[in-house]
Image (cartoon, rainbow, N blue to C red):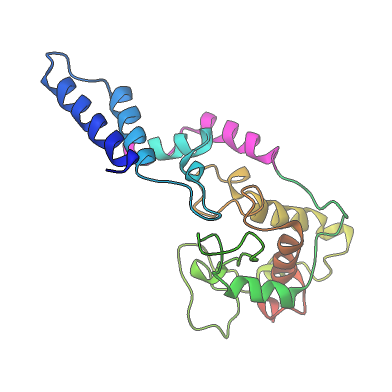
Amino acid sequence: MKKQHKIVLSLLATAGVIAGCATAPSSADLDKMTADIVKASFRDQGIVKASVLDTDETNRACSAADVAGKPLDEKTALALQAANLKTIKWPANGKFLGSWQAGEKLAQSGRGLTWTDAATTPNGGNCYNCHQIDKKEISFGTIGPSLYNFGKLRGVSDPASPASRGMVEYTWGKIWNAKAYNACSNMPRAGHMGIMTEAQVADLVALLLDPKSPVNQ
């Protein structure tokens, strides 16, 4: 019998003993027991590590809100957003825009982060899974808002101009760590979690803001 299966059985047996007691286990006890059982069921394999199950304060707070069926209170949400804003890493070379052509390829690709991938395998952005981006694309998700004409609708005719700086930085930050602007956003924290490199984030920013990009046609 594999070690993790023995751990699961042991935890289940413990749960049975607790259930038979006069005092019911607390919610915290049950949460910990559940987390232990889940962790015992996973192992490191290839580039995928069981530590991916570890959550931070933001994820825990948003999960608890989901279970309760209500949004975070404003004070907690603002505090979490402020904490996440501090994690945004701005481009080391000072260049926020890369190649929109490379960004389009990233948006189309959902490749990466599976145990069969090598550590050097570039991850895709999988952006079309949640957003409309290019008007010509007929297959896209609707979990997130349409990003078609993203730059045009926001008046970004020249991303290099000082007038566009705020929107350029916002777009970078949103891709790097979306929870800096919406604590319980469903959008992956692409840069913060190491899904996208700085260069890839710059390419996605270009896809959204470059006037020549199909997004803004």
Residue shown at 79%/49% (left/top)? 90
Residue at image location 82% in from the left, 65% down from the top? 159
Horizontal placement of 176 versus 131: left or right?
right
Q: Is residue 212 above or below residue 169?
A: below
Front residue of 216 and 179: 179
Q: Quadrant of the N terminus?
A: top left
**Residue 34's image quarter?**
top left
Q: Which residue is located at x 66 percent, y 58 percent?
A: 196
Q: Is residue 185 magenta?
A: no
Magenta span: 66-87
Does residue 173 sit above or below 205 in this rendering?
Answer: above
Answer with the quarter of the image where residue 146 lies: bottom right
> Residue 195: percent from the left, percent from the top?
62, 56
Residue 43 at what x, y percent from top left?
Answer: 43, 46
Residue 15, position as x, y percentages in the image: 20, 27
Image coordinates of residue 45 in percent, x first then y, are 48, 53
Left or right: where does residue 213 sit relative to residue 81? Answer: right
Query: How many labels, in total?
Result: 0
Q: Residue furthest front?
A: 1
196 relative to 180, above or below: below
Q: Residue at x 69, y 66 (%)?
A: 204
Most foreground residue, 58 or 197 = 197
Residue 70 part of the magenta segment = yes
Predominant secondary structure in magenta? Answer: helix
Which residue is nearer to you in this view: 84 or 109?
109
Hey, which residue is sitting farthest top in the picture? 22
